Image (tube, helix red, strand yellow):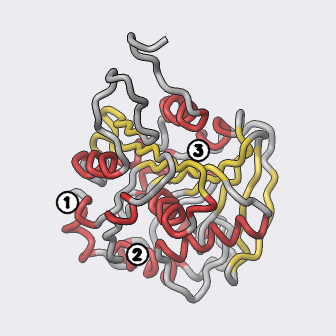
Amino acid sequence: MLRTVIIAGVLASATTAFAQSEPVGDYAEVNGMRMYYEVSGEGDPLIVLHGAYMNIDTMGGIIPKLAETHKVYALEFQGHGRTNDIDRPITYPNLASDVAAFMDEVGLERADVFGYSMGAAAGLRLAIDYPEKVDQLVAASVAYDASGWQPEFTAMIPTMSPDMFVGGPMEEEWKRLAPDPEGFRAFAERLIQLEKEPMAWEDEVKALDIPVLIIAGDADVSTLEHSVAMFRLLGGGVMGDMGVPLPASRLAVLPATSHTAVINQVDLLHLIIEPFLEGETPKGMFEQ
């Protein structure tokens, strides 16, 4: 998830210079909101979910890269980007419900999902709550339990307040697209409360029956041990070259990579994500 204090790094480094053939933007009526989304590319449907305080633009170059081989539906969550905020808590079940309602609104029965940070947790919750809608999930910088956060971040959560962000560059960036430029404080309060939301999804993750690609930076906001534990819940971590197929789920750890650096490594992300979505597996020396 994209955490509230370190998000400024992503906002500062994000660029729209990667834009290829112009995506088509539109609005969908979703759970009392006018949810903004953009469609680009052709191929199997792929839903892209951004992190907290982000929008489609700040996801940077990964969206047009994925659109080279997929029909990408990039969404903006409640209160983010051009989607209006409403008087409702921002929770992972609510975000997942919004994605499910969006799919119904635009006529998508099933799709692959790629989420980063908050969007990854929302995608994970979507796969848990609406398994019939998700073919494959790519979850970058994700946790399934609050115990998986780095100790420094866990200690910081109780100190968070809207005053840390109101009047600063984060609010100014948010106002650039917001339908209600005066609503930032209420929006920030909702996202701070999200950080305090209980997360204990181990049994539900273990019960998932879809392929999941976990992507983590080696200096991410979730611990490496937590990412490995999640991989094992999904059947990963076994020895290959033993005459049986590898598990469908995968784990990728990006070297020298902090939380906000994950989404900026477009070429590396694409090299990891694309083979997973296409079901391609590297061949070992004992395989024909």
Q: Residue furthest front?
A: 243
Residue in view at x 66 percent, y 52 percent: 111
Q: Please say if 218 is above or below 185.
A: above
Between 109 and 84, the one nearer to me in the picture = 109
* Residue closest to the eye, 243 or 240: 243
Image position of 170 with respect to 61: above or below: below
Q: Which residue is mark 3?
A: 60
Q: Is residue 125 left or right of residue 37?
A: left
Query: As shown in the figure, which amino acid type bears the numbered disc 3?
Result: Gly
Is residue 169 visible to us here? no
Q: Which structural element holds mark 2?
A: helix
167 or 9: which is nearer to us?
9
User: Which residue does the image show at 54% across and 77% down from the upper left?
Assistant: 94
Give residue 200's position: percent from left, percent from top: 31, 70
| Mark 2 vs mark 3, CA separation in Å | 24 Å
Q: Secondary structure at mark 1?
A: helix
Q: Quadrant of the rendered structure where residue 201 is?
A: bottom left
The image shows residue 191 at horizontal and vertical percentages of 44, 74
N-terminal-most mark, 1 or 2: 1
Marks 3 and 1, how far apart in space?
A: 27 Å
Residue at 71% from the left image edge and 64% from the top image edge: 103
- Does the residue at mark 1 contact the one at mark 2 (Cβ under 8 Å)? no
Callout 1: few (<14), some (14-19), or many (20+) C-alpha neighbours within 10 Å? few
Q: Which tag, 2 or 3, sits closer to the chain's start?
A: 3
Q: Tell me the CA gap for discs 1 and 2.
A: 17 Å
Q: Which residue, given by chain and number where applicable, does mark 1 sit on?
A: 152
Q: Nearer the viewer, residue 28 or 60?
A: 28
Kind of residue sitting beneath label 1: Glu
User: What amino acid type is highlighted by mark number 2?
Assistant: Leu
The residue carrying mark 2 is: 194
